[in-house]
Amino acid sequence: MRLKNKVAIVTGGARDIGRAVSLKLAVEGAKVVVNYFQKEEDAKETLAQIKNNGGEAIAVYGDMTKSADVTSLVDKTREAFGEEIHILINVAGGLVARKATLEIDDEFWDLVFNLNVKSVFKVSKAVLPYMPSGGAIVNFSSLAGRDGGGPGASVYATAKGALMTYTRALAKELGPKGIRVNAVAPGMIATTFHDTFSKPEVRTNVANATPLRREGKASEVADLVTYLVSDESSFITGTNIDINGGLAFS
């Protein structure tokens, strides 16, 4: 129960890695706010799993690129669990689609950046007035942010690289207030993201090229995130930690 009595918001917390993070934080004692956008049934299933394990959580709908939805998320968190928000996990993001440069227009570029970078800015800004000293933020970057991504992922990769820089900037800004900010950069993790955007043969080739010879698990990412928001990592801030089975090194 490393996070007993802590309040945590997990954006995009209803499925895949977000769900694994929500479940792990709850097991460690946190009161979890599971933000979802697309599928309410995913949020309900995540809540059911948390409650079946004796945890405490609520689900809140919202598009984290919309200011009104972000404000609603924070307000509902305070209504349910009080005025302090100790943990923020910014999982929400996405590739949207694979497009070559000549296929990309301004609208698509802005959509991907808003989803992956501006959303983190909006949620962090809304949460910070309620985050006390000792609080922690974890952002979700990607291996794509380091190596430029796969075919058609240039905008996504660029956005995730920007998020790495924003993580470092926030860590410098918030460190004097006792708030730590880190990011994780997953490689090939077995999720519906890759079910949607990666061909099976590509996944097999990547797994075979990884020193550990497999894809990662969402639960393994959740374990890292939990460490980063716990007191066990109290002198770690401004990092972008790779979790990719040794596929690439920073």
Image: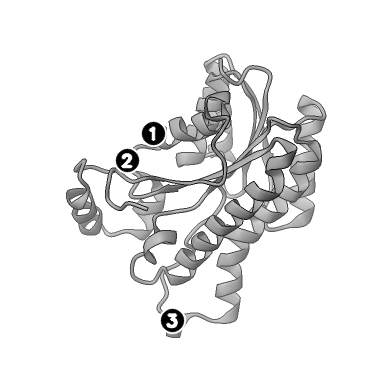
Q: Earlier in the sequence, mark 1 or mark 3?
A: 3
Which residue was labeled with disc 3? Answer: 101
161 up-or-down from 55: above or below: below
Q: Give the amino acid type for the residue marked by disc 3 in the picture.
A: Thr
Q: Is residue 209 visible?
A: yes
Identify the image quadrant of residue 143.
bottom left
Q: Is residue 120 left or right of residue 129?
A: left
Please provide percent x and percent y for residue 213.
19, 43
Which residue was labeled with disc 2? Answer: 216
- Residue 220's tag is 1
Disc 2 crowd, CA 10 A, few/some/many (<14, 14-19, 20+)? some
Q: Is residue 75 left or right of residue 11?
A: right
Please provide percent x and percent y for residue 100.
40, 78
Disc 3 crowd, CA 10 A, few/some/many (<14, 14-19, 20+)? few
The residue at 24%/59% (across/down) is 202
The residue at 50%/29% (across/down) is 227
Q: Give the amino acid type for the residue marked by disc 1 in the picture.
A: Glu
